[in-house]
Image: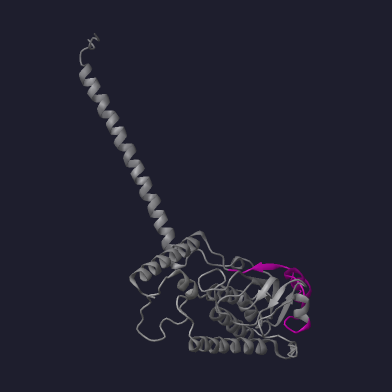
Amino acid sequence: MDQLPSQPGWERELVTKLAQMNLKEQRARRRWSIFFRLVWLALALVVFAAIMGWIGHGGSGSDRSGRHTALVRLEGEIDDHGKASAENINAALNAAFQDPDSVAVVLNINSPGGSPVQSSRIYNEIRRLRKDYQDKPLYVVVDEMCASGGYYVAAAADKIFVDGSSLVGSIGVIFHGFGVDKAMEKLGVESRTVTAGENKAFMDPFSPAKPEHKAHLEAMLGEVHQQFIKAVKDGRGDRLKLNTPGLFTGLIWSGNKAVENGLADGLGSVDSVAREITKAEDLIDYTVEENAFDKFARKLGTSFGAGVMQSMVKAGWK
């Protein structure tokens, strides 16, 4: 059997050691608590600064100087919440034009198109900037593709340069839809869509298409198409070869053919335009880049919106 320590006062020594250990543990817990509070405070400050616009958006040209060619990149689908939104592109274009050291602006486009509203806003802003800065030209340089809304934007430029194999044009408007009413009928599935307003279920994929709905849609698309055609004609002027078959029918052309029919002015790249046209080889990129917070917020907003839509559908709203 173990013997208890025989030295006098061992109980007091043990109690003292236990108290000291407990004190050290409390101090360590307090230090970690302070550390995590500081981390959360720093994170909150970063989020607040991003929301206020103090960090994040901004092209790389803001801290550069010297005679140069300003570069703005329009990449991907043109929509209201992505990198190629009118807000981002127009902000970059304004910064590029306003810089007294930029001698010209090159808009590098690689886009299949997208929102006609966003494209129109960029087009109109380019026209305004060209008017306000008449001594500073804007050239479009096409990479792989400049189609539909992408070409809508390009038509506002002083000149358009392409690669011989670029895909250019698609001057048309499209509405994507589908109909599954016949398949539902074969499967014995019944649509129970209920509306208030005889046209609320306009082009409902679960019901047979109504001729009057199709006619209305075609008229609406035709109106937008005519706006597109007018923008191209206003931008390109007499450079267009209007006798080209299918010019405004939605057809897409190679870069070489685009030069032939007046949709583009010549062959060139960003570097060759800066070197041979603007005579300012130093390129400074003004493109608005998304930071990590922007991407997270956009994804969060998309997820939240999808959740709201699902809830509405479940509730019977449309």
Bounds of the magenta segment: 260-287
Q: Residue at x 50, y 62 (%)?
A: 295
**By what rule are the colours in the image chosen?**
one colour
Residue 96 against residue 42 in the figure, above or below: below
Q: Which of the two residues, 179 or 167, is positioned nearer the viewer here?
A: 179
Q: Residue at x 55, y 68 (%)?
A: 83
**Location of residue 300 by image quarter:** bottom left
Q: In what quadrant of the picture does the N terminus appear? A: top left
**Residue 270 lies in the magenta-colored region:** yes
Report the side of 288 relative to 194 (left or right). Answer: right
**Magenta region includes residue 61:** no
**In terms of depth relative to the viewer, which is nearer, 107 or 284?**
107
Quadrant that contains the C terminus:
bottom left
Q: Position of residue 138 (x, y in %)?
A: 68, 79
Residue 163 in picture, x, y percent from top left: 76, 72
x, y percentage for residue 221?
56, 86
| Drawn side of residue 218 relative to residue 316, left or right | right
Q: Using the rendered image of the protein, determine whether residue 183 is visible from the camera's viewpoint.
A: yes
Q: Position of residue 162 (x, y in %)?
A: 74, 74
313 horizontally vs 109: left or right: left
Quarter of the figure with residue 207: bottom left
Q: Is residue 67 visible?
A: no
Q: Quadrant of residue 168?
A: bottom right
Residue nearer the viewer, 202 or 208: 208
